[in-house]
Amino acid sequence: MPKARCASRKRSTGRHDQRNLVAHRGNVKNLWGMRKNALITAVLCMAALPLLPAGAQETTGTAEVRALELKMLDCYKHRQVEVFAAVLDEDFVITFEDGTTYSKTGYLSYSASSSTHVELADIPEMKIRMHGDTAVVTGVYHEKGLDNQRMYDYHDRFTDVWMKKSGKWRLVAAHYSVPTK
């Protein structure tokens, strides 16, 4: 008895197989080209991420605290005590590298001292962590200048704690320490 052929199978003549193979190779080339383009696009997007402004990646609270930190730095450098007095909480306390602590009043008096001339005040590194209405700022602080006619050059680590009270950010605590490398 002769074998029954499956109706869904077509016997190959060889002629169409060649065209199918060529079409398949074309699809493979297109697929590789598409993958290559997708890879290039992904690499370019990743390379552009650091160019985005930092503010675009921050929450509103983080951006506000960062701006206040930089404003306080500038006011301290130019001894504009009355400007940064407004953002210090009434219960503010600061601890310096040597363990000395000052309240708001003591720190304002210290900052207004005419015997200190700040030439450079910089925060090259700053990280802000938000916890509701509290922000903890850590970073690196560099200050250089003259104190009682003697040059100084401080390289410190710092921690500032900000709290949002009645809709305004207030600096409640600050701590400076000397890194031990």
Image: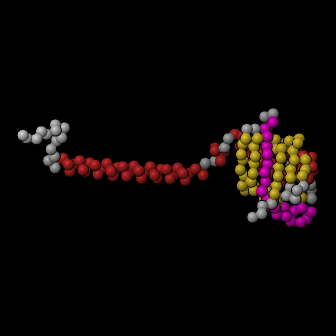
The span picked out in magenta is 145-165
41 and 96: which is toward the camera: 96
Please state the horizontal and vertical placement of residue 174, each as a whole percent of the image: 82, 49
Taking the image as shown, residue 89 lies to the left or right of residue 179, namely: right
Does 8 appear above or below 23? Answer: above
Residue at (90, 47) in percent of width and height: 103
Taking the image as shown, residue 68 lies to the left or right of residue 18, namely: right
Does 45 appear above or below 119? Answer: above
Residue at (86, 41) in percent of width and height: 89
Does 153 appear above or below 93? Answer: below
Q: Residue furthest front?
A: 1
Residue at (23, 47) in percent of width and height: 20
95 and 63: which is toward the camera: 95
The colour scheme of the drawn protein is: secondary structure
99 and 33: which is toward the camera: 99
Q: Is residue 163 magenta?
A: yes
Please state the horizontal and vertical placement of residue 125, each as a whole percent of the image: 72, 55
Does 103 appear above or below 149? Answer: above
Q: Residue furthest bottom?
A: 150
Magenta highlight: main SS: strand
